[in-house]
Image (cartoon, rainbow, N blue to C red):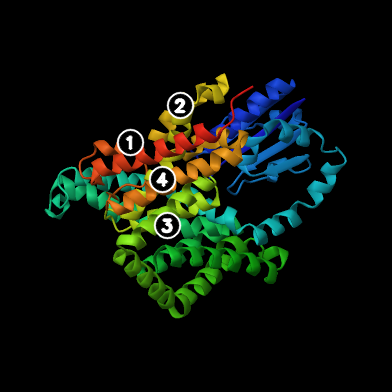
Amino acid sequence: MKLVAITSCPTGIAHTYMAAEALQMAAKELGHEIKVETQGSVGAENVITQEDLRNASAVIIAADTNVDKSRFAGMPLVEVSVKDAIKDPKALIQRALAAKASDAPRKAEASANTQEKENRNGPYKHLMNGVSFMIPFVVAGGILIALSFAFGIKAFEVKGSFAEALFRIGANGAFSFLVPILAGYIAYSIADRPGLVPGMVGGYLASNIGSGFLGGLIAGFLAGYTVYYLKKVIKLPKSLEGLMPVLVLPVLSTLIVGLIMIYVLGNPVKGINDALTGWLNSLSGTNAILLGTIIGLMMAFDMGGPLNKAAYTFGVATISQGQPSAIMAAVMAAGMVPPLAVAVATVLGKNKFTTQEREAGKAAWALGAAFITEGAIPFAAADPLRVIPSIMVGSALTGALSMLFKCTLAVPHGGLFVFFIPNAVGNVLMYVLSILIGAVVGGVILSTIKKPVA
């Protein structure tokens, strides 16, 4: 049998390709053929063609972002989270092949209703769609800002200097798009292309008013659902239907969202945002350690899932003004620990891991160093009750120590590789120590509680 599949995760870095590889290996073991289109950070690769669709018996979509399913109308289709494809790809393939041919026409007829249900019930997917489009802006801007700090932490204040140019491109350029892009693509996920204009305008207004990421989130969902319900309410004669996407929806939705952001939600959300920022800046001692502990637990609990992405987005928000952040430092350090901890465990407890797991442990060193938390997923999927608590302890300890040592980070990603950029990491020696302690503690716990392989 031949299948086609799409994999897509919010960051488009790790889960996307791990899920694709898992499906390909499982299909080969089951004696089937599969073509997997990856919709990652570099765009769609190995794109499914019309010929592939004609020969395919079923479709698998493993995604945590919004994926266009219109080309699969009339085909048996199974849709799951990208993590499900990593955990049990064989069961997923068998489930797809078990879909009855008679289900296909009914699926085609019900596609509109299915889309409506998803539009109403998929807030996490919509949020992750916005985050996935925002991350390249975050990374590009963050790295350029960090490079400007390489000339001195205040070098960007010298007018006309190269450091100032780098800072302007990063902070005033890439970072200025963060909230509009986030809001625009949340709205796009909900209402398709008509949601982009009101979403981006709402995000721009939120950023201008000072309501920040929180205002951008509200603007994105407000814009998406405004367009969605305007399409339901407004019915034009067939001769005028062409005006809906280019005139009626953009103008009305942008007006509604703009007025609500300016006169209703903007200032109250700004007050909440300012209060939250003030509280974060005032954190010290026990409160800072507690926040670092919570961040660590969130980063390790689902390794790329909702809690992990919530903590990461929270960290990104704290560097959106172009200044180093203690919270972003705790987020990245805690996110590096899970793969490093399982790698340590495979060394300390060789008899407790299969040959395949020990080989995967070697790759986990590199994944952890690169801040790809998902490197621990294969181990967690095989033994969740022992692996997840162990890495959560390690990550919580690292997050707490990072905050205790007042480590800061000026970039949102990069792992070990940003340590070599001068001034990108504040208190870099203690930062490295925090990560090492968490990785070793997590690895020791895991190697201790894990049972030997028969």
Residue 311, x across and y down, in percent:
45, 54
Rounded to the nearest angstrom, the CA distance separating label 3 from label 4 is 14 Å
Task: Please name the residue that numbered disc 3 is placed on.
Answer: 314
Q: Is residue 290 above or below residue 433?
A: below
Instruction: Assess disc 2: are there few (<14), some (14-19) or many (≥20) residues with their C-alpha within 10 Å of its C-alpha.
Output: some
First-in-chain label (4 vs 2): 4
Rounded to the nearest angstrom, the CA distance separating label 1 from label 2 is 23 Å
The quadrant where residue 314 appears: bottom left
Residue name at image x 57 percent, y 39 percent: 386
Residue 416 circle label: 1
Locate residue 109 relative to residue 153 in the image: left or right. right
Rounded to the nearest angstrom, the CA distance separating label 1 from label 3 is 21 Å
First-in-chain label (1 vs 2): 2
Type of amino acid at the residue the image marks with label 1: Leu
Task: Please name the residue that numbered disc 2 is placed on.
Answer: 348
Residue 43 visible in the shown view:
no
Locate residue 425 relative to residue 280 in the image: left or right. left
Residue name at image x 41 percent, y 73 percent: 272
Q: Are marks 1 and 2 in contact (CB under 8 Å)?
A: no
Residue 334 circle label: 4
First-in-chain label (3 vs 2): 3
Callout 2 secondary element: helix
Instruction: Assess disc 3: are there few (<14), some (14-19) or many (≥20) residues with their C-alpha within 10 Å of its C-alpha.
Output: some
